[in-house]
Amino acid sequence: MKFSISRKLWSAFLGFRITSALSLTIYTVKYSDCDQSFVPPYPYTHTVVPSSSLKTRFFTTMLMTTARIHLLLLLLHLFSFALISFFPVPGSAQNFAIATICNSSVGISYNLVSIAKSFPYVSDPSEQPYAFRANLEIFNAGKEDLRGWEVFIGYVNREILVSAGGALVSDSSSFPVNASNGVTLTSSSTLKTGIETANDLTQMGVVLELKGTEFGKNESSLPNNITLVDPNFQCSEPVLSVKG
């Protein structure tokens, strides 16, 4: 998967943001000529120490502080690495889509919006879950209204469909639904024609936001088929489209 921001650039950015948040204030240690006391720059009561122990205490404090800073920076570096590993920068939309035309009047497209590695992380690559987002678009460019439509999506990567943007599963299954053998979505809405809506695209088409999970890092995260489930419509073979 190609990310819009490289891992190195993202890691450097995180390191810069985290390090800049750690502003270290350098305190000036002053000696008192009168009582030879050392006043630590901390909000608690100081202790008067003999001048013979002053330098030892000072350098010991500085060494401990330096060691703590190095340890903290090491931990932040490890945290930054872990953050990149466990929360990869989400790729921009793959810009992959498949589309079909039914009776030269109804257009259907399935657009992959994003896909990213999902929890839990497992050692077997074929069992690793990936969360995906996709848009299913249906548009009526014909002379007749499209009422109570049903669309079949031929998933092939053991998908589990979590939500369908308001559409329902035709067999009345509830979400999340096992879509590994494909799933048919339906809606009671009517997609009107351009004639009766003065070409109002919002009434002629619908965009459904789909969310789900697939398994394995697959060559393609697209279904192998989309079609209108209606005996009065004949749909073409889906065509792959790569945008950008």
Image (cartoon, rainbow, N blue to C red):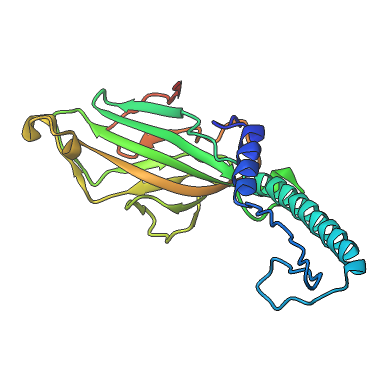
Residue 153 lies, in percent from the top left, at 44, 40
| Residue lying farthest to the right in this orientation | 52
The one of 21 and 179 positioned closer to us in this rendering: 21
Quadrant placement of the N terminus: top right
Height in image: 78 above or below 241?
below
Q: Count up the numbered dots.
A: 0
Left or right: residue 136 compared with residue 83: left
The one of 138 and 154 positioned closer to us in this rendering: 138
Left or right: residue 233 compared with residue 239: left
Q: Residue at x 37, y 24 (%)?
A: 236
Q: Residue at x 87, y 66 (%)?
A: 54
Residue 173 lies, in percent from the top left, at 42, 60
Residue 8 seen in this snapshot = yes
Quadrant placement of the C terminus: top left
Residue 74 lies, in percent from the top left, at 78, 50
Residue 232 seen in this snapshot = no
Residue 201 lies, in percent from the top left, at 18, 33
Quarter where residue 220 is shown? top right
The one of 90 and 8 positioned closer to us in this rendering: 8
Height in image: 125 above or below 72?
above
Q: Residue at x 38, y 50 (%)?
A: 164
Quarter where residue 72 is shown? bottom right
Height in image: 39 above or below 144?
below
Q: Residue at x 79, y 73 (%)?
A: 35
Left or right: residue 218 compared with residue 111: right
The one of 113 and 215 positioned closer to us in this rendering: 113
